[in-house]
Each structure stands twice: as structure tokens, then as C-alpha cells.
Image: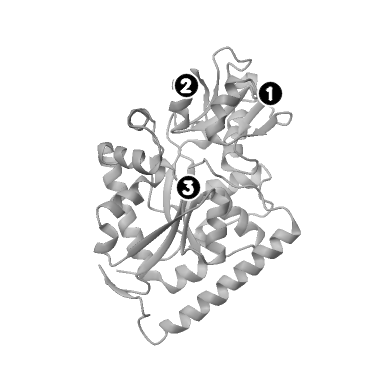
Amino acid sequence: MLRNATRTVRSRSRRTRLGILATSLVMLASVSGCGLLGGESEDSAEGGNGPLEKSKITVSIMPTIDLAPLHLAMKNGYFKEEGLEIETISAKSGQNSLTKLISGEVDIAYSSYSPFFLAQSKGVANLKFVADASSAAPNSTLIMAIPDSKVQSVQDLEGKRIGITAKGTIIEVLVKSTMQANGVDFSNVEWVEIPFPDTAAALENEQVDAAFLTEPFITQAEKSIGAVPVADTAKGPTKDFPTAGYGASADFADNNPKTVAAFQRVMQKATNEALADRSKIEPLLVEHSKIDADTAKLATLLTFQSALDPQRLQRVPDLLLEFGIIKQAVDASQMIAKPAAD
């Protein structure tokens, strides 16, 4: 999921506002936690491994392909088997999803990883990851151009106009890393911010010389304007690069370890099923990602993930730091929620 990655929160006023929201969230979570000291909360339920601290949770989502395992789990009733009821709330972007989390509107937020690490590095919020979602697979995150573009290879990208959804995102990291790995200077690139749905038109109208795309927009650009790959950003230092995951506030994760464990068991089960049989998720891509059946069949999928590997995840803040998108180092292992033991 790279479609809706975030912009950096720059202004002091915005930091202050989000800081207030984060403080409010901590207060709300603390109040809720007090109710747990005497036993089960009112909405606790009997899950697969005993009563859950919270049986009804809200999750912010977006119409992206790598949410297919979540939709599969909901369709097949896997959350209900664990005593969990899931309500999904749509978010416009990864930053919007994180804002919903910080404000307390949702319990768990799905997003590309950049917003989580940006917020953590700035002290805007104290966050924990509860599940992985995806990593870059070969040919799933491409720099593309039209056939007669000035850009025919990575070496041609220097000094050109490159379309990305937003600065300060994993997309920027993937493009810069690809250029750096090929010995290409990215300091004089003109970054043009374009939403994925508008990128094919921007390429065709020569608003940009090349652009980053992921699925289903890769397949759609190939079909609509004959766009061709310039470089696969899922190679070299960004091979299998973590792209998106599910996060919660640290208070929620600490106060609801059985709920977190139930969520993780469900996501692992659904992810295994999605990886084993693509035919089960293609209809879900049509239903939830708003793409046609032909595109769903042709699209190169990101690699679905569920288990959180600290070493693999650490690659994200390390590259964000290397390219100056975050200013403070972040230890990813300290952001992984510890679920209740079986």
C-alpha cells in the first residue's frame, strides 16, 4: 500500500494539535484501562484463547490491494471465531488513517509505514504495530514512463520530473534508493506530487517524465497509455521492503493483549490463505479495491505479510533516516506489540 502515504507534519501548530489529540487518547485509554482492573470490560467476549479485553474494535482502512486478507477474514467469519467484531472506517490516506487512530476514532489503523514512523520519531504519538500487511514484490512497485519518454532507464532519471504521490513517503524512499543504488544523483530531481489515479494522464500529457506506480495502477497505466517499466524499485536494497501494516496506540496494545493476539491470529490465518490461493482474493479486489475483474486478474500483487519481524521492519526507519525524512532514529523492535501468551 503506497497509494496514500503521508506528508511530513511540519508546522508547530499541527504538532501541538496532534500532541493534544495524542494526550487525549492516552487519557481515554487510561480511563478504559481502569475498568479492566476489576475484570472483564462490558464488551469483553470469549475468544479462541479466553475472554478478550475488547470484543468490538474499529479499524481504519483504504481501498488498497494489500487489505485483501482483512476482507477475506471478515468474509469468512474468522474474526467472529475469535470473539472479535470488526467495524471498518474508511480513511482517505495513510496520514488520515493515523489521525483517526491518534484521535481515538479507531482502535487500529492500516497505513503505509511512513506515517507511523514519522509520528513516533516526532513524539506525536506512542504507537505499536499489531500486524504486518505487505512488502514489495518484484514488479509491484515500478518507476514507469511512456515509450517515447526522455526516460528510458534509471540513468535517465537525473534532473527529470518524477511523479510521486507525496514527499516524505515510502514512495520517495523507494525511488531515491533505486537511483542511489544505480549511482544516479537524485538531488536535482523535480518531484511532482500526483495522486495515483491521475498519474497515467500526467505521463501521457508529459506533465512528468516518469512516475512511481504500484498496483492496480501499473496494470491500468499499461492498458490505458501503454506505459512501460523503467525500473523495479523492489530490487537491491529495497528488495522485499516492508510497505504497510496495522498499528495501534501503545496504550491500546498494552491494555488489550488478548485482543491484539486474536487479531494477529486471524490476520495470519487469512494471510496464509490469501498467499496459497489467489482465486480467493481476486473477487475481493474487485469489491473493495474498485478495480475491474480483468485488472484484478492481471495485477502483480504486493507480498501479503502478517508476522512482524523486527529486523525486516527496521529497514523502514533506517532508510527514512538515511534520506532525511525522519530526523531521529527509531527502534522498530520497541514498536511491536507484545500479545498475550497462549
Tally of numbered tags: 3
With 254 as the anchor, is 284 left or right in this view? left
Q: Which residue is mark 1?
A: 160
Distance from Cα at disc 2 to Cα at disc 1: 23 Å
Viewer-side residue, 206 vs 45: 206
Q: Which residue is mark 2?
A: 224
Q: Earlier in the sequence, mark 2 or mark 1?
A: 1
**Could you tell me if the residues under marks 1 and 3 are in contact, i.e. CB atoms within 8 Å?**
no
Q: Quadrant of the C terminus?
A: bottom left
Q: Provide residue 40's location: percent of width, then percent of height.
A: 35, 81
Question: Which disc number belongs to residue 239?
Answer: none
With 68 as the anchor, is 108 left or right in this view? right
Q: Provide residue 236's location: percent of width, then percent of height.
A: 51, 32
Q: Which residue is mark 3?
A: 244
Q: Residue at x 44, y 33 (%)?
A: 215
Q: Residue at x 32, y 53 (%)?
A: 268
Distance from Cα at disc 1 to Cα at disc 3: 28 Å
Q: Residues within 10 Å of mark 3 (few under 14, many from 20)?
A: many
With 182 as the anchor, is 225 left or right in this view? left
Q: Residues within 10 Å of mark 1 (few under 14, many from 20)?
A: some
Name the residue type under label 3.
Ala
Viewer-side residue, 293 vs 311: 293
Distance from Cα at disc 2 to Cα at disc 3: 27 Å
Q: Earlier in the sequence, mark 2 or mark 3?
A: 2
